[in-house]
Image (spheres, rainbow, N blue to C red):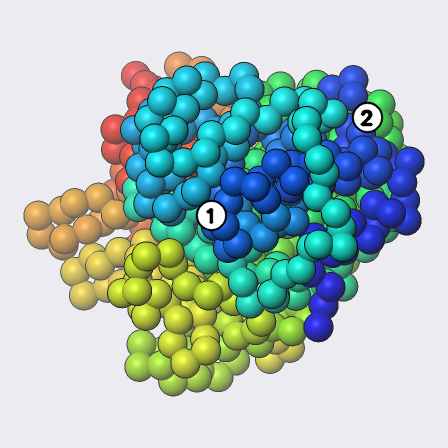
């Protein structure tokens, strides 16, 4: 059995003591100080919650967030971490849905007064001060005892379809997946990793937990609004690794001068949470050629990682989403649940000890996704003869156009290769005759915004689609947009695109 995350964190903290665990602004928090704060949070909670209680957490990425999570676990509770950008009724609805016994709030959160008033009648509400500010008797490490099958966290999915679901992850799920991730990535104790992903979502949380388990140092950045400032921080802190979503790398390439900065300490980067085209990966690697590039695939329901792959130069597997990491089995199945041979497209299904226990208070949805011990991901893809996974979009995003079924990702792959395109999303537009037809929403390069440039870019996009795609897959229209509506974890909210502001090209 893999060592549970709380046990491993406390063990690493005893061994490394004075080593920097977290760098946050000008502050530097050692492993010993972080462990001490977690035990003080645990001591404060132990008197307030029952064993197995769900504890809400509404805080920004910070050392206090980390101490709160490990403190909740030390006290025998389960963490329900929510996006601090949510407001009022939406926050209250999710907290009530999860049935929390206690709520931990950032002292500076603008909704602290509202939540304290609305939730305080039925729950304990605690405001978490800066590290070192929690008073009371710390929990004894000897008193910490956790069941691997007990609930560790409820992670609400980011809701790209407007319906967040509470993914239940056990301590075993997290421990097993953390060990598998560490086996697939070159994470070292001496690493200094910049963290720009929200901790309340699975990708950011996995970066946090894997690096604490390895005894590495995390440099926290709460915002990616100014990528140039983040890049300068990476240089100043001698960062060795970076985890990002596709938009992270696009912003670095479009809005900074990567080659002009000393990134000699950067060893590797990872991308997950969506597709980054082979062209874009090649472009990034040209700008920082010494950096190893890992593509990864997973889901919150898988704790989260399922596949990973380190791309070699001129790699024949370019465009793949990785290969199953240790302890995980991947299969491709048809609509009747039958296994498909290599190179045939079907639903990606996964099995392993990392797969969630189910959705909180949603047995019907759980039964649709968990079948016979297999996680049905809802992703379309195929495995090549060597076991590498290639994704072809989401089942629920498939368009039905007349007698044809169209995967948006096929069209997006073509458009992303067009010079002048920063990013693209293809969705089904209503059509009286065919039911749906493809429509492309494109973010153009900043240099493609001239009066004549956008009409020319539209023609180029449509010409390339006509040249490379079947006629029924060619978009009916191309609209230009400045930014896509996204969740806090960086995923495009496709259902909001039709109400988004377009860029006029007339």
What is the spatial separation of the Cα atoms under label 1 and label 2, in whole angstroms?
30 Å
Where does residue 119 sit, x and y in percent of width and height? 36, 30
Residue shown at 64% from the left, 42% from the top = 42
Residue shown at 62% from the left, 56% from the top = 296
Whether residue 321 sits left or right of residue 478 in the image: it is right
Is 164 situated above or below 448?
Answer: below
Where does residue 205 sit, x and y in percent of width and height? 61, 45
Q: Under tag 1, what secondary structure?
A: strand
**Which is nearer the N-term, disc 1 or disc 2?**
2
For mark 1, does the 10 Å Cα neighbourhood hold few (<14), some (14 to 19), or many (20 or more) residues? many
Q: Nearer the viewer, residue 347 or 449?
A: 347
Name the mark on residue 28. 2
Whether residue 382 sits left or right of residue 5 in the image: it is left
Name the mark on residue 54. 1
Q: Nearer the viewer, residue 71 or 470?
A: 71
- Tag in front: 1 or 2: 1
Name the mark on residue 37. none
Residue shown at 74% from the left, 25% from the top = 132
The image quadrant of residue 240 is: top right
The answer to whether residue 401 shows anywhere in this view is yes
Is 485 situated above or below 269?
Answer: above
Where does residue 7 sit, x and y in percent of width and height? 74, 56
Q: Split into 4 quadrants, where in the image is the C terminus? A: top left
């Amino acid at each position: 059995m893999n060592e549970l995350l709380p046990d491993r964190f406390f063990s690493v903290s005893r061994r490394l003591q004075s080593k920097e665990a977290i760098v946050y602004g000008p502050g530097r928090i050692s492993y010993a100080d972080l462990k001490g704060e977690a035990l003080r949070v645990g001591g404060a909670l132990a008197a307030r919650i029952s064993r197995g209680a769900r504890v809400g957490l509404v805080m920004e990425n910070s050392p206090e967030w980390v101490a709160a999570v490990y403190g909740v676990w030390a006290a025998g509770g389960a963490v329900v971490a929510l996006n601090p950008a949510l407001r009022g009724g939406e926050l209250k609805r999710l907290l009530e849905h999860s049935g929390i016994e206690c709520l931990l709030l950032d002292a500076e959160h603008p909704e602290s007064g509202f939540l304290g008033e609305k939730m305080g009648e039925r729950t304990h509400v605690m405001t978490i001060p800066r590290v070192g500010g929690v008073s009371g008797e710390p929990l004894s490490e000897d008193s910490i005892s956790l069941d691997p099958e007990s609930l560790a966290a409820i992670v609400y999915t980011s809701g790209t379809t407007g319906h967040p679901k509470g993914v239940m992850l056990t301590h075993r799920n997290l421990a097993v997946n953390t060990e598998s991730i560490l086996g697939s990535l070159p994470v070292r104790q001496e690493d200094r990793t910049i963290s720009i992903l929200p901790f309340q979502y699975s990708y950011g949380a996995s970066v946090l937990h894997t690096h604490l388990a390895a005894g590495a140092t995390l440099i926290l950045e709460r915002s990616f609004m100014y990528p140039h400032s983040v890049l300068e921080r990476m240089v100043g802190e001698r960062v060795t690794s970076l985890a990002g979503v596709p938009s992270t790398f696009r912003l670095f390439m479009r809005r900074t001068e990567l080659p002009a900065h000393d990134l000699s300490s950067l060893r590797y980067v990872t991308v997950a949470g969506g597709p980054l085209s082979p062209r874009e990966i090649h472009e990034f690697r040209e700008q920082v050629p010494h950096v190893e590039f890992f593509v990864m695939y997973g889901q919150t329901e898988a704790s989260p990682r399922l596949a990973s792959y380190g791309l070699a130069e001129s790699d024949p597997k370019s465009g793949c989403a990785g290969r199953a990491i240790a302890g995980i089995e991947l299969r491709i199945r048809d609509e009747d649940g039958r296994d498909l041979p290599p190179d045939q497209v079907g639903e990606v299904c996964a099995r392993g000890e990392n797969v969630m226990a189910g959705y909180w208070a949603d047995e019907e949805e759980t039964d649709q996704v968990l079948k016979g011990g297999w996680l049905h991901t809802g992703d379309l893809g195929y495995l090549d003869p060597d076991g590498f996974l290639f994704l072809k979009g989401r089942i629920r995003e498939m368009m039905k156009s007349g007698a044809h079924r169209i995967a948006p990702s096929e069209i997006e792959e073509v458009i992303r290769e067009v010079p002048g395109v920063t990013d693209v999303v293809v969705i089904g537009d209503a059509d009286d005759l065919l039911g749906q037809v493809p429509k492309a929403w494109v973010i153009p390069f900043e240099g493609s915004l001239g009066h004549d440039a956008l009409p020319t870019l539209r023609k180029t996009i449509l010409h390339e689609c006509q040249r490379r795609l079947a006629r029924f897959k060619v978009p009916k229209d191309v609209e230009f947009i400045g930014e896509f509506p996204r969740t806090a974890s960086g995923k495009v909210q496709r259902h909001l695109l039709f109400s988004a502001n377009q860029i006029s090209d007339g």
